[in-house]
Image (spheres, grey):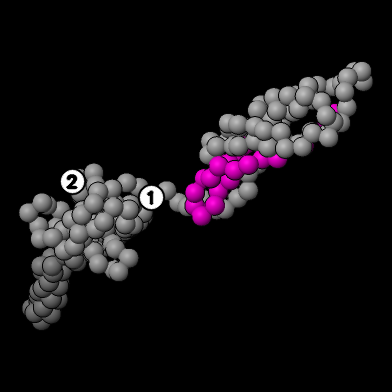
Amino acid sequence: MSRRWPAALAAALAGAALLLRCASAPPPPPPAPAPEPAPEAAPAAAPAEPVPYVVKGAKTQLREGPSTKASVLARLGKGEKVTGVEEKEGWVLVKLRDTRVGWIRKDLLVKDAPCPADRPPVVLTQPPIRISDGTGPKGRVVVEGSVDAGGKVTAVKVTENPSGSPELADRAKSELLLMTFTPAVKNCRVVPFTYVYARNF
C-alpha cells in the first residue's frame, strides 16, 4: 500500500494542476465588430447655370465685391452684355466678354433674351372668302398691306385692279385687313413688313 501512495498522489496532483491551469486561462477575446460601412459622399452641388444679362444703366459700376463700399473695377455702358455666374444678397457676380469678373447690383441688369433666328412672315389667319353667285363683277385685284411688328395689318392700298371694279377692290382690302401674321424677324429684331394680297374674283 505504501508503495502505491506516492504514485496516486502524484497523479492526483497532476490532475489538480491541469484543472487549475484550465480554470485560470483567460477567456478568448470577443469577436471583432464588423466594420461600419463608409458614409456615402454627399452629391456635389451642380454648378449654377450662367445667365445672360444686359446692363440697364449708363456708367454701371463693376465692383470687386458685393457691396457699394467695394473697389470699382470698371464702368459699363448701357446695353453691354455680361454673363451672371452667382447671386448674393441683391448682387450678381458677372463675367465680361474680356474675361474680367466683378459684382453688379442686380437691379442694374436685365436678363438678355436669346436672339430669335431670322424668319419670313407667316400667315396665321386667312380671310373668310365669300363665294360669288356668278352675277357680280369678275377679275383680279392686288392689294398691299402694311403689317406691324405685332402681326396686325394697319393699312392697305390697291396696287393693281385689272377688274376695274371699285367693289372688288374694297372687298380685297377688307379681306386683307382681317388677316393676321407671325411677324418677320431679321438680325434678332421683329420687323414690320408689306404683304401683297392677290385676289381673283
Disc 2 from disc 1: Cα separation = 21 Å
Q: Quadrant of residue 198?
A: top right
- Numbered mark located on residue 68 in the image: none
Residue 191 lies within the magenta run: yes
- Counting from the top left corner in percent of width and height, residue 60 is at 21, 53
In the rendered image, residue 108, in percent from the top left (x then y), is placed at 24, 47
Query: In the rendered structure, which amino acid carries the disc numbered 1?
Result: Asp
81 and 51: which is toward the camera: 81
Question: In this rendering, would 24 be left or right of 171?
Answer: left
Q: Name the magenta segment's main secondary structure.
A: strand
Q: Position of residue 46 (x, y in %)?
A: 34, 56
Q: Looking at the picture, which amino acid does disc 2 mark? A: Glu
Q: Quadrant of the N terminus?
A: bottom left
Residue 89 is marked as 2
Say which quarter of the image contains residue 166: top right
In the image, the segment drawn in magenta is: 181-201
The location of residue 147, given as percent across then percent down, is: 59, 37
Q: How many numbered discs? A: 2
Could you tell whether 167 is left or right of 7 in the image?
right
Q: Which residue is mark 1?
A: 112
